[in-house]
Image (tube, rainbow, N blue to C red):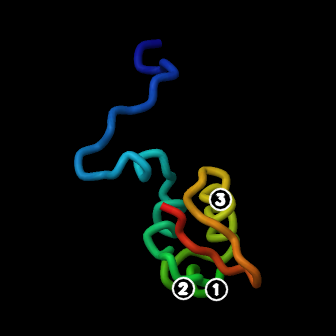
Amino acid sequence: FDGLADEPPPPQPGIEPILAGLGADERAVYDHLSKEPAGVDALAQRSGLPVHKVVAALTLLELKGHARQLAGRHYTRLR
């Protein structure tokens, strides 16, 4: 089974290494995060994703160290 090794894919040109490991929903949410707190509903509206997908993406972004949850279900970008 060639190509199924546990090696990460090569970096894509023009994409920061931090972002290369993000899924489509995570990237869509990450693109709309900033240092200013944003609520889940606002992120859903900006990203065009349903709230449940935004919450799932934010959870993964938190676990990967890219986002931080603040009071009132607001989030900021860490990197």
Q: Amino acid at mark 3?
A: Glu
Q: Mark 2 vs mark 3: give the one in front.
A: 3
For label 2, the crowd category at 10 Å Cα-Cα, with few meaning under 14, some 14 to 19 and many 20 or more, is few
Question: 19 above or below 43?
Answer: above
Residue ID at (75%, 81%): 71
Which of the 4 quarters of the picture holds residue 9? top left
Rendered residue at 50%/76% (across/down): 35
Residue at numbered disc 1:
41
Residues at circles 1 and 2 in contact by the CB criterion of under 8 Å: yes
- Mark 1 vs mark 3: which is more N-terminal? 1
Element marked by disc 2: helix
Q: Secondary structure at mark 1?
A: helix
Where 37 falls versus 11 (above or below)?
Answer: below
Circle 3 sits in a helix, a strand or a loop, which is it?
helix
Point out which mark residue 62 bears.
Answer: 3
Q: Nearer the viewer, mark 1 or mark 3?
A: 3
Say left or right for 8 vs 75: left
Q: Position of residue 61 (x, y in %)?
A: 60, 58
| Badge 3 density bin: few <14, some 14–19, many ≥20, Cα 10 Å | some
Q: Residue furthest left?
A: 13
Contact between marks 2 and 3 (CB within 8 A): the answer is no
Q: Position of residue 36 (x, y in %)?
A: 53, 82
Q: Residue at x 49, y 83 (%)?
A: 46
Front-most of residues 1 and 35 = 35
Residue 18 in the image, given as x and y percentages of width and height: 43, 50
Question: For this view, does 58 lie left or right of residue 22?
Answer: right
Indicate the amino acid at tag 2. Answer: Gln
Q: Which residue is mark 2?
A: 45
- Write the residue at 67% across / 52% down: 63
